[in-house]
Amino acid sequence: MKPGGSSGRLHALRFESQRFRLLTIVVGCFLISLTFLLSSRPDATVFSTLNPRESLEDARMPAMKMLHRSSSAGLTRDFHVDILPQQGDRDTHAHLQQSVDQTAEKTEWVKDTVIIQEVAGERSEEAEEAAERVTADSGDEAAPAVVADEDNAVKTTATVATTARPDQPLVEEKKKQQLPVKLQDAGEPARTPEQTVTSHSVDRRPLCDFSDFRTDICDFSGDVRMAANTSEFVVVVDPAAAAAASHKVRPYPRKGDATCMGRVTEITVRTTGDAAGAPRCTRAHGVPAVAFSIGGYTGNIFHDFSDVIVPLYNTVQRYRGGVQLVMANVASWWLVKYDKLLRELSRHAPIDLAKAGAAGEVHCFPSAVVSLRAHRELIIERERSLDGLATPDFTRFLRRALSLPRDAPTRLGDGTGRRPRLLVISRGRTRLLLNLDAVVRAAEEVGFEVVVNESDVGNSIEQVGKLINSCDALLGVHGAGLTNMMFLPPGATMVQVVPWGGLQWIARMDYGEPAAAMGLNYIQYEIAVAESSLKDKYPAGDEIFTNPTGLHKRGFAFMKQTLMDGQDITIDVTRFRPVLQQALHNLAAK
């Protein structure tokens, strides 16, 4: 053998050995990579005759999915949803289902793994929306716990804090609800599994509503305790279900009027999770409580009704007498005057908050409302009333409570020969009608029977109501006495004489709009400068005549002192006669 030939064969053998080792390394790396891929992704399809989109979608359907979302506070929430394949897919992917089942026996679930997959770089929008819906339903404090069923389908059992509707009581309830979650890629049929959600329904609404322009009102239920000595309503709640809250309310509907609200007792409404430390009941009631103040501007019949009695009716009528009235800033004369109305609204003697506090009483209720539901002046708006009440419902209540007999006025030509009655309200101190006698004569000449009355705060409400109800029309200068129009029978006429000074808007707001809401015919007579006593106090070119509305910017106190209480009226009877004729015409037989 030649040395040169032996050396060549040895060299070739070494070269072939290197190629074999290199091939072995390449194959080994491939096998290792493939093994790692299969072990880390049991749902992956390596060889498939389906198109890539179908392979990816069908391969992931039997797998366990996790929707992983982060809250704005940085906390995370995991929702595990098992997406089962449709019937037609089960035979094709039986080997995949078997693989997943075997994996599920060993590990129920893997955290921090992204299972919502991407197809062609796009995330399933349906899946993201489903995750958002579940997150929204669960609340910010939901803490899900996972339970695997017999079929290895993973379901979500979550503790969900939900916000109750305004008409739900403040109580803790446990509910179970089925929430469907749809995960769907474009062009693929939706799969709708079920999540079993155990919900602790907690009334998350605020204890109090501060949004109304007239009043702040609190409405709550549960274990309610009124500690009278501290003017405090305490609601005992489950400390795990609700955070402590505390609010202060002045229960009178003149919000923003510092002078008025300074006369109203402040009431605290708070929750506590310490039942043992809460005030201990000295008396338990089986009916709701409604707490309000009769301080503020009460004592003026307009405010008695607009601020208290009308809102009180709107608030408590739903209880049909089964309600306990709790009153702050009580005046005994006020209770006596409106006794009949209060008895119609509640079968229970009212609680004087101050007297109960002096006796150290703690009253307990199943629910309570602090403050009254007030709408516009002397008006209940049906669309805002919780019970669909309106102003005519209130005037019917008045006629029933005071036994007022007439619900329709006298009509001209009704065959009785009776003349319609006109009641003229005579003011005693301000905004005097200086030529009252001339006005009375003009009204009688037109065809009215005229009655003159000066409304007095000390008058019995029953006597006033019966007098007004016997009349068919009411006439008066702008002021609280016009509130008596609510005793008129529906279809009667109310005439308001408006003093000089751009006061048309307030006259219409206080009495014109309420009159229409009560079903009355309303006439507004606005006096001229010549009819006002202001002409004798100010020069002809004064701003009070040239631009009276410009003076309104000085505030209501200035308006009241100068434009309301600062003038008397002498009506131009000739100019006023058509108004009287229109009032009579309104009573023509229909």
Image (tube, grey):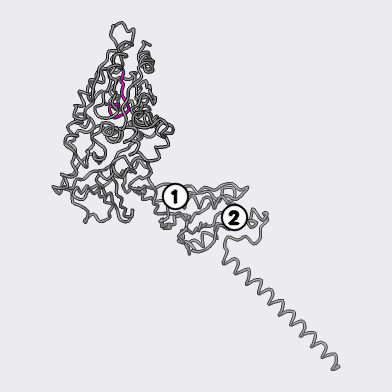
Q: Estimate the x, y position of residue 97 in percent, counting from the top left.
A: 55, 57
Q: Which residue is mark 2?
A: 123
User: Which dot marks residue 137?
Assistant: 1
53 above or below 383? below
State whether residue 389 appears in this view.
no
Q: Residues within 10 Å of mark 1 (few under 14, many from 20)?
A: some
On the image, which quarter does residue 582 sit in? top left
| Residue 265 placement, left or right of 37 | left
363 above or below 241? above
Q: Quadrant of the C terminus?
A: top left
Q: Amino acid at mark 1?
A: Asp
Looking at marks 2 and 1 on the same chain, the residue that comes earlier in the sequence is marked by: 2
What are the residue bounds of the magenta stretch? 472-482
Q: Secondary structure at mark 2?
A: strand
Q: Residue at x 17, y 32 (%)?
A: 336
Q: Residue at x 26, y 31 (%)?
A: 301
